[in-house]
Amino acid sequence: MQKHSVLLKEKLCEGCTNCVKKCPTKAIRVHQGKATIKEELCIDCAECIRTCAYHAKYSRTNTFLELADYDYPVILIPPSFYGQFDGIKPEEIHRALYKIGFKEVRDVAVAAEALSWKTKTYLKDNPGMFISSSCPVVVRMIKILYPELLGHLLKLKAPVEIMAESIKTELREKGLAEEDTALFFITPCPAKNTTIFNPMGIEKSFLDKSIAVDLVYQEILKVLDEEVNSNDDKELITNSTHSDAIDRDKITPIPYKGFSWGQSEGELSLLDDDLSKRTLSVSGIHNVKDLLEELSRNNVKGIKYFELAACNQGCVGGVFNVANPYQAKHNILKLLDEGKNMIEQDFSKYNYDLTKDLKAIQIDRLDSNMEKAMKKLIQLEKEIDLLPGLDCAACGAPDCKTLAEDIVNGRGKRSDCIFVLRQQVEDLADKMSELAHALPPVMRNRK
Ligand code: SF4
Ligand code: SF4
């Protein structure tokens, strides 16, 4: 069963080790010039995709081809998606998606607004410090590397799942058969694609498919370009305030406030003012890891709520996006001015709570058997002492300690370290030179 969305094309890998150094969970090794990913450690953060100059790491999602398999396909737009466009209004994006063939176009930001309300209540009712559970990469990282922080994760679903469940209920109430409908999500990142087939905190995802932002973006531009070419009045396309082409009945109210969730600090901006001095937003997987490290040592005090996003500047930094995260963030901030209030809706209609515990993912770095693990620990310390401690990754492991672990586990050898190898070669050369000059006793001259 597929567990991740970040994949490897081995034949493109040049064995450069750049990805090895960037992977936050030390999931990558290079052996014999080719990278491999340790599935159990991968959190789908996509750092390796960003880093690989040879495009050996990649991710794929569903495509528009699958649209034809359903009578009633619905598409869910994440808040960050609007940041990809400059000067194209949300209504036009909705309209283009209807033209592409979706029967309903829905905004995840609607549920994000509701979740902001729920989070405020949750934080008021529960003492202690909490971490947003909306970024799946962050949740997976905590499960693997910082299980001691699991109790601090907000036990609420991500906005997309809240929205998806609510839409599924609506479709059922409309009398549509389950097999005729499908919920497609426009995903900014591989990790959100993974949550569809490998969910966390719920039994099953209510989403059925996902399509990467870049694919949807291109398709929307195609539709809008065709309209421009077939219409003399280009203003009609770019200025939708007087666009007759929009079927206004179909387009749901635009949740501008909820769009703020698409970029860093956006989730926090919708919380109460009295919380504002006790919240912190951190984005970028290495910054998030640094913070979690400090939190696990109890070194950060006075903060009630953390908004953490694996990608730089939040979901606008997802690897499937087209616009750079700074431009996309700016585009979203501009859109926020369009809506003064949250849209009117009944917040109590959603199911917010996670239905399963978020459990630690146990990785036995040495051995699951305690006795063997203790023996390996002693061996590990010896191996660490024998390696130079330069953490250069030239051995194909991210640092000397990890190579030592691989050696102890029979997956590496000391001579994988180029410095150890060089020393071994020098020692061998000295020995050979010594041997070359050595004469057997019978041949030695007497003085
Ligand atoms: S996606 Fe992230 S965790 Fe997975 S192998 Fe790549 S860098 Fe490592
Ligand atoms: S911050 Fe990045 S990894 Fe996390 S959910 Fe958003 S796009 Fe995905």
Image (tube, helix red, strand yellow):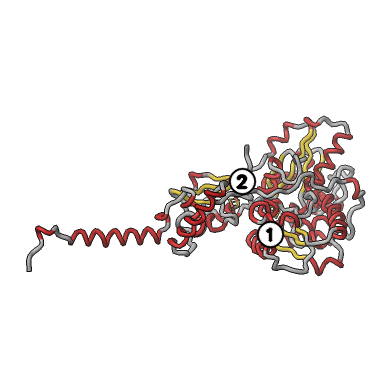
> Left or right: where does residue 406 sit relative to residue 292?
left
Image quarter (top left, top right, bottom left or bottom right) of the C terminus: bottom left
For the residues marked 1 and 2, what is the alpha-carbon distance in whole angstroms? 19 Å
CB within 8 Å, label 1 to label 2: no
Image quarter (top left, top right, bottom left or bottom right) of the N terminus: top right
- Labels 1, 2: front one: 2
Query: Mark 1 Cα within 10 Å, few/some/many (few <14, many 20+)?
Result: many
> Left or right: where does residue 340 sit relative to residue 76?
right
Counting from the top left corner in percent of width and height, residue 320 is at: 66, 50
The residue to which callout 2 is attached is: 59
> Left or right: where does residue 338 sit relative to residue 366?
right
Counting from the top left corner in percent of width and height, residue 327 is at: 70, 61
* Image quarter of residue 219: top right
Counting from the top left corner in percent of width and height, residue 324 is at: 66, 58
- The foreground one among 202 and 258 is 202
Residue at x 67%, y 39% (from the top left corner): 63
Query: Mark 2 Cα within 10 Å, few/some/many (few <14, many 20+)?
Result: some
| First in residue order: circle 1 vs circle 2 | 2
Residue 303 showing in the rendered view: yes
Q: How many marks?
A: 2
- The foreground one among 285 and 245 is 285
Q: Is residue 377 above or below residue 219?
A: below
The residue to which callout 1 is attached is: 325
Residue at x 43%, y 61% (from the top left corner): 386
